[in-house]
Amino acid sequence: MIREPDMDDLDRILANDETLVPSSGFAAGVMDVVRNAADEPPPLAFPWWRFIVGVLGCIVWSGAAISVLGQLDVRGPADPLAPIGLSGLSFAQWTLTIVIVTIAACGLRFLRHHR
């Protein structure tokens, strides 16, 4: 918060007709920075093709893993899932769940970086 005596000093400074002159070398320094920024190559584009191939690969691998694990007669890993009702999911339901979670996670990360 500005106190009254400071406001009087501010009014006195602003009422002064002196012209402001940048320090020596300021304009040249700014222009050097602008030129250097203009000479830099543009940032790399996001590799959407590789991203899509990676997501599809993850979907295929997770589907294959679920298929193989679904054919095994193992009770150990399925028992902890029974209380939350996930043990009765079919192959298609598991695959759809994994796809939705993957797309949601990637979409949230993309949105967070592009605000």
Image (spheres, grey):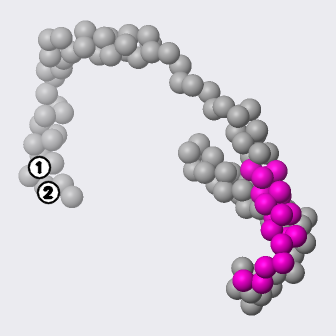
Identify which residue is drawn at 56% across, 45% down: 113
x, y percent for residue 78: 76, 81
Q: In which quadrant of the rendered image does the N terminus lie?
A: bottom left
Q: Residue 67's image quarter?
A: bottom right
Residue 68 on the magenta span? yes
Q: Is residue 73 magenta?
A: yes
Residue occupying image coordinates x 66% and y 31%: 47
Q: From the image, tell me which residue sits under label 1.
A: 6
Q: SS at mark 1?
A: helix
Give the residue number, with chain letter if any, for mark 2.
3
Q: Viewed as shown, does residue 112 lie left or right of 3? A: right
Q: Which mark is residue 97?
A: none
Quarter of the image for residue 30 reads top left
Magenta residues (range): 58-76
Q: Are marks 1 and 2 in contact (CB under 8 Å)?
A: yes
Height in image: 47 above or below 79?
above
Count neighbours of disc 2 (C-alpha within 10 A) and say few if under 14, some if 14 to 19, many if 20 or more.
few
Q: Nearer the viewer, residue 14 or 30?
A: 30
Considering every residue shown, the one lying at the far bottom of the view is 83
Q: Position of residue 32 (x, y in %)?
A: 31, 11
The Cα atoms of the two marked residues, 1 and 2, are separated by: 5 Å
Residue 12, image x, y percentages: 12, 37
**Three-letter code for the amino acid on which mark 2 is drawn:** Arg
State the SS at label 2. loop
Residue 2 percent coordinates (x, y): 18, 55
